[in-house]
Image (cartoon, rainbow, N blue to C red):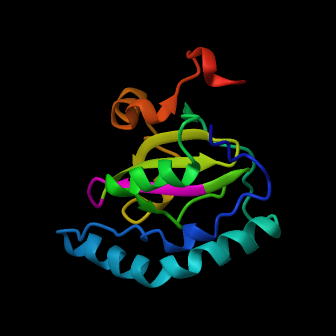
């Protein structure tokens, strides 16, 4: 059994994950937003960290929509590698939830994304939402945040243990 929940978890391999890419939009207005986000995205983690540290923006805890925990027969690296193989990529334009190891997204189109977070305690949370690039204010305000639990569980299959399972371990 591969358990990786210690605070000293080696996450250096996460630097090699592919970065999430936006889908190139069709409308002229969306293309202007696309260009802005291409320039801004690399700066976002630093700006997010400074604004939350200074109390300008407030974020604590973990977002809703718990899916379950990574199956005990997989390491976090194996689980995340499987997600990347399915088209998920590292998502830097996002909150950093407490205990989060990585934030991944699958961009459906310029407007919507599937967003999944993996935590050091092996918990997995996910939702479907607007992309920050297309609708930054609606995204920030968490408008149109959808559970889509069944879709995520179907995609994850036996790589996740759900809260209803005996071996969930809470």
| Residue 87 visible at all | yes
Is 59 on the left or on the right of 142, as rendered?
A: right
Residue shown at 42% from the left, 46% from the top: 129
Tell me the quadrant of the picture where the N terminus can be found: top right
Is 90 on the left or on the right of 51, as rendered?
A: left
Q: Is residue 108 magenta?
A: yes
Seen as rendered, the residue at the extreme right is 54
Image location (x, y in percent) of residue 116: 49, 47
Tell me the quadrant of the picture where the C terminus can be found: top right
Residue shown at 50% from the left, 41% from the top: 126
Front residue of 125/155: it is 155
Is 77 on the left or on the right of 5, as rendered?
A: left
Is 70 on the left or on the right of 146, as rendered?
A: right
| Residue 139 visible at all | no
Front residue of 112/6: it is 6
Number of dots carrying numbers = 0
Q: Is residue 114 magenta?
A: no
Where 47 falls versus 68 (above or below)?
A: below
Image location (x, y in percent) of residue 169: 69, 24
Q: Quadrant of residue 10?
A: bottom right
| Helix, strand or loop for the magenta stretch, by majority | strand
Give the residues in magenta. 102-110
Where 154 falls versus 129 (above or below)?
A: above
Image location (x, y in percent) of residue 58: 74, 56
Image location (x, y in percent) of residue 118: 58, 48
Residue shown at 58% from the left, 57% from the top: 102
Seen as rendered, the residue at the extreme front is 1
Seen as rendered, the residue at the extreme bottom is 39
């Amino acid at each position: 059994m591969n358990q990786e929940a210690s605070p000293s978890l080696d996450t250096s391999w996460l630097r090699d994950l592919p970065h999430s890419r936006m889908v190139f939009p069709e409308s002229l207005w969306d293309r202007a937003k696309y260009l802005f986000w291409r320039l801004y995205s690399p700066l976002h983690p630093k700006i997010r960290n400074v604004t939350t540290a200074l109390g300008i923006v407030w974020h604590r805890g973990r977002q809703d929509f718990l899916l379950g925990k990574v199956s005990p027969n997989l390491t976090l690296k194996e689980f995340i590698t499987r997600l990347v193989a399915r088209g998920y990529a590292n998502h830097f334009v996002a909150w950093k939830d407490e205990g989060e190891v990585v934030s991944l997204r699958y961009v459906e189109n310029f407007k919507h994304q599937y967003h999944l977070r993996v935590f050091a305690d092996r918990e997995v949370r996910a939702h479907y939402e607007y992309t920050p690039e297309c609708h930054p204010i609606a995204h920030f305000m968490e408008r149109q945040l959808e559970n889509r639990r069944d879709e995520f569980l179907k995609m994850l299959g036996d790589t996740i243990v759900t809260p209803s399972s005996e071996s969930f371990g809470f």
